[in-house]
Image (cartoon, helix red, strand yellow):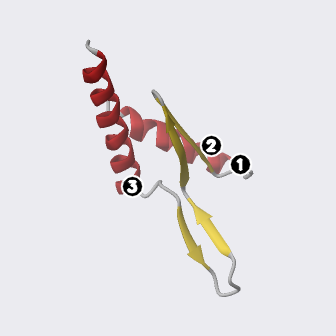
Amino acid sequence: MKPLALAGLVHSLFCDFDTALGEAGLLKTSKTDSSGGDEETGLFKIDNMGDAYLCCGWLPETSCKSLSRCVCVCVCLCGCM
């Protein structure tokens, strides 16, 4: 595969990831509660670095609930490929 074709494929895949996570409600959203604080929900996309899609979520929460959400993200991303 030629370099420009590969770059186009990776870009397309990352766009599909963003779309799928957004439609599944897994991307980070910020809601302000009545006390003025922020309640963060979802996954936070940090960056695209070359051919890496870097994100983190639900930290520092450690529970079965956060683990199951991470599995949902993996299943969602696998469905894009």
Of circles 3 and 1, the one toward us is 3
Q: Where does residue 57 sit, x and y in percent of width and height?
A: 61, 49
Where is residue 13, by image quadrant? Answer: top left
Q: Which residue is drawn at 43% across and 37% down?
A: 75
What's the residue type where badge 1 is placed? Ser
Q: Where is residue 80 in the image (x, y as percent from the top left)?
A: 32, 35
Q: Is mark 3 on a helix, strand or loop?
A: helix
* Circle nearer the viewer, 2 or 3: 3
Mark 1 secondary-structure assignment: loop
Residue underneath mark 3? 22
Identify which residue is drawn at 53% across, 39% down: 71
**Residue 49 seen anywhere in this rendered image of the structure:** yes
**Which SS class for mark 2?**
helix
Which residue is at the far front? 4
* Residue behind mark 2: 67
Q: In this view, does 81 lie above or below 44?
A: above
- Callout count: 3
